[in-house]
Amino acid sequence: MSAEKILIVEDNPLNMRLMQMTLRGKGYTLIEASNGEEALDKAVKEKPDLIIMDMQLPTISGIEATQRLRKIPELSRIPVIAVTAYAMKGNQEKFIEAGCNAYLSKPINTRELPGFIENMLKQRK
Protein backbone atom coordinates (compact mmCIF):
# COMPACT_ATOMS: atom_id res chain seq x y z
CA MET A 1 0.00 0.00 0.00
CA SER A 2 1.03 3.54 -0.72
CA ALA A 3 1.76 6.03 2.04
CA GLU A 4 1.66 9.11 -0.17
CA LYS A 5 -0.04 12.17 1.26
CA ILE A 6 -2.83 13.85 -0.69
CA LEU A 7 -4.17 17.25 0.29
CA ILE A 8 -7.83 17.58 -0.72
CA VAL A 9 -8.97 21.21 -0.86
CA GLU A 10 -12.75 21.30 -1.14
CA ASP A 11 -15.35 23.52 0.55
CA ASN A 12 -18.36 21.31 -0.26
CA PRO A 13 -18.69 18.61 2.44
CA LEU A 14 -20.38 16.15 0.05
CA ASN A 15 -17.63 16.47 -2.55
CA MET A 16 -14.99 16.16 0.19
CA ARG A 17 -16.61 12.99 1.50
CA LEU A 18 -16.89 11.50 -2.00
CA MET A 19 -13.17 12.03 -2.64
CA GLN A 20 -12.25 10.68 0.80
CA MET A 21 -14.33 7.55 0.28
CA THR A 22 -12.86 7.05 -3.18
CA LEU A 23 -9.22 7.44 -2.07
CA ARG A 24 -9.17 6.14 1.51
CA GLY A 25 -9.18 2.49 0.42
CA LYS A 26 -6.13 3.09 -1.77
CA GLY A 27 -3.84 3.57 1.22
CA TYR A 28 -3.18 7.28 0.82
CA THR A 29 -2.84 9.58 3.82
CA LEU A 30 -5.56 12.17 3.29
CA ILE A 31 -5.27 15.76 4.52
CA GLU A 32 -8.25 18.11 4.27
CA ALA A 33 -8.65 21.84 3.78
CA SER A 34 -11.88 23.71 3.13
CA ASN A 35 -10.48 27.03 1.86
CA GLY A 36 -7.44 28.50 0.15
CA GLU A 37 -5.75 29.87 3.28
CA GLU A 38 -6.10 26.56 5.10
CA ALA A 39 -4.76 24.77 1.99
CA LEU A 40 -1.59 26.88 2.03
CA ASP A 41 -1.08 26.34 5.78
CA LYS A 42 -1.53 22.58 5.50
CA ALA A 43 0.67 22.34 2.41
CA VAL A 44 3.51 24.08 4.26
CA LYS A 45 3.10 21.87 7.37
CA GLU A 46 2.39 18.53 5.70
CA LYS A 47 4.30 18.77 2.38
CA PRO A 48 1.82 16.55 0.49
CA ASP A 49 2.78 14.45 -2.53
CA LEU A 50 -0.22 15.73 -4.50
CA ILE A 51 -2.94 18.35 -4.10
CA ILE A 52 -6.52 18.17 -5.37
CA MET A 53 -7.59 21.83 -5.49
CA ASP A 54 -11.15 23.04 -5.94
CA MET A 55 -10.97 26.28 -7.93
CA GLN A 56 -14.05 27.92 -6.32
CA LEU A 57 -13.05 28.39 -2.68
CA PRO A 58 -13.81 30.82 0.14
CA THR A 59 -11.07 33.22 1.36
CA ILE A 60 -8.76 32.88 -1.65
CA SER A 61 -9.54 31.02 -4.87
CA GLY A 62 -7.91 27.79 -5.91
CA ILE A 63 -6.11 29.71 -8.66
CA GLU A 64 -4.61 32.18 -6.20
CA ALA A 65 -3.73 29.42 -3.72
CA THR A 66 -1.96 27.49 -6.50
CA GLN A 67 -0.07 30.60 -7.63
CA ARG A 68 1.09 31.18 -4.04
CA LEU A 69 2.14 27.52 -3.68
CA ARG A 70 4.29 27.79 -6.78
CA LYS A 71 6.24 30.65 -5.17
CA ILE A 72 7.26 28.47 -2.17
CA PRO A 73 10.42 26.63 -3.30
CA GLU A 74 9.86 23.40 -1.34
CA LEU A 75 6.24 23.17 -2.55
CA SER A 76 6.65 24.40 -6.11
CA ARG A 77 6.93 20.92 -7.67
CA ILE A 78 3.93 19.29 -5.96
CA PRO A 79 1.41 18.21 -8.63
CA VAL A 80 -1.85 20.15 -8.37
CA ILE A 81 -5.07 18.84 -9.90
CA ALA A 82 -7.59 21.62 -10.53
CA VAL A 83 -11.20 20.59 -9.87
CA THR A 84 -14.27 22.67 -10.74
CA ALA A 85 -17.91 22.42 -11.65
CA TYR A 86 -17.54 25.49 -13.87
CA ALA A 87 -16.08 23.83 -16.94
CA MET A 88 -16.14 26.83 -19.25
CA LYS A 89 -14.13 27.06 -22.45
CA GLY A 90 -10.69 28.45 -21.64
CA ASN A 91 -10.80 27.49 -17.95
CA GLN A 92 -8.43 24.56 -18.36
CA GLU A 93 -5.81 26.85 -19.92
CA LYS A 94 -6.33 29.37 -17.11
CA PHE A 95 -5.77 26.67 -14.46
CA ILE A 96 -2.65 25.34 -16.18
CA GLU A 97 -1.32 28.91 -16.52
CA ALA A 98 -1.86 29.40 -12.77
CA GLY A 99 0.38 26.39 -12.08
CA CYS A 100 -1.99 23.42 -12.01
CA ASN A 101 -0.68 20.24 -13.63
CA ALA A 102 -4.02 18.74 -14.62
CA TYR A 103 -7.74 19.43 -14.59
CA LEU A 104 -10.85 17.43 -13.68
CA SER A 105 -14.43 18.65 -14.01
CA LYS A 106 -17.13 17.95 -11.45
CA PRO A 107 -18.92 15.76 -10.84
CA ILE A 108 -15.78 13.69 -10.20
CA ASN A 109 -15.76 10.27 -11.83
CA THR A 110 -14.97 8.05 -8.83
CA ARG A 111 -13.98 5.14 -11.07
CA GLU A 112 -11.34 7.19 -12.88
CA LEU A 113 -10.03 9.31 -9.98
CA PRO A 114 -7.74 6.68 -8.33
CA GLY A 115 -5.99 5.81 -11.63
CA PHE A 116 -5.68 9.49 -12.52
CA ILE A 117 -4.02 10.22 -9.15
CA GLU A 118 -1.76 7.19 -9.44
CA ASN A 119 -0.53 8.43 -12.84
CA MET A 120 0.07 11.94 -11.46
CA LEU A 121 2.11 10.53 -8.57
CA LYS A 122 4.18 8.34 -10.94
CA GLN A 123 4.98 11.38 -13.11
CA ARG A 124 6.26 13.17 -10.02
CA LYS A 125 8.93 10.51 -9.32
Image: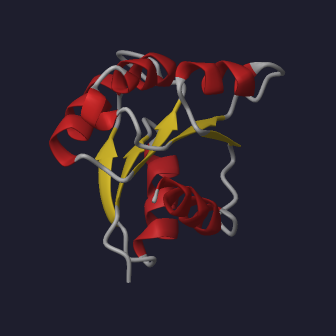
Whole-percent x and y of residue 113? 62, 61
Whole-percent x and y of residue 23? 47, 67
- Split into 4 quadrants, where in the image is the C terminus? bottom left
Q: Which of the 4 image quadrants contains residue 106?
A: top right
Whole-percent x and y of residue 101? 58, 38
Q: Is residue 70 above or below residue 39?
A: above
How does the figure colour the protein chain or chains?
secondary structure
Q: Residue furthest right?
A: 89
Q: Is residue 36 above or below residue 27?
A: above
Q: Which of the 4 image quadrants contains residue 111?
A: bottom right
Whole-percent x and y of residue 18? 52, 59
Q: How many marks?
A: 0
Q: Residue furthest left?
A: 45
Q: Residue furthest bottom?
A: 1
Q: Looking at the image, which is closer to me, 32 or 99?
A: 99
Q: Which of the 4 image quadrants contains residue 33?
A: top left
Q: Looking at the image, which is closer to me, 65 or 100?
A: 100
Q: In percent of the image, x 28 and y 25: which residue is there?
A: 72
Q: Residue furthest front?
A: 125
Left-right relation of 114 to 26: right
- Split into 4 quadrants, where in the image is the N terminus? bottom left
Q: In percent of the image, x 34 and y 20: which residue is there?
A: 71
Q: Looking at the image, which is closer to me, 19 or 79?
A: 79
Q: In percent of the image, x 67 and y 18: which residue is there?
A: 94
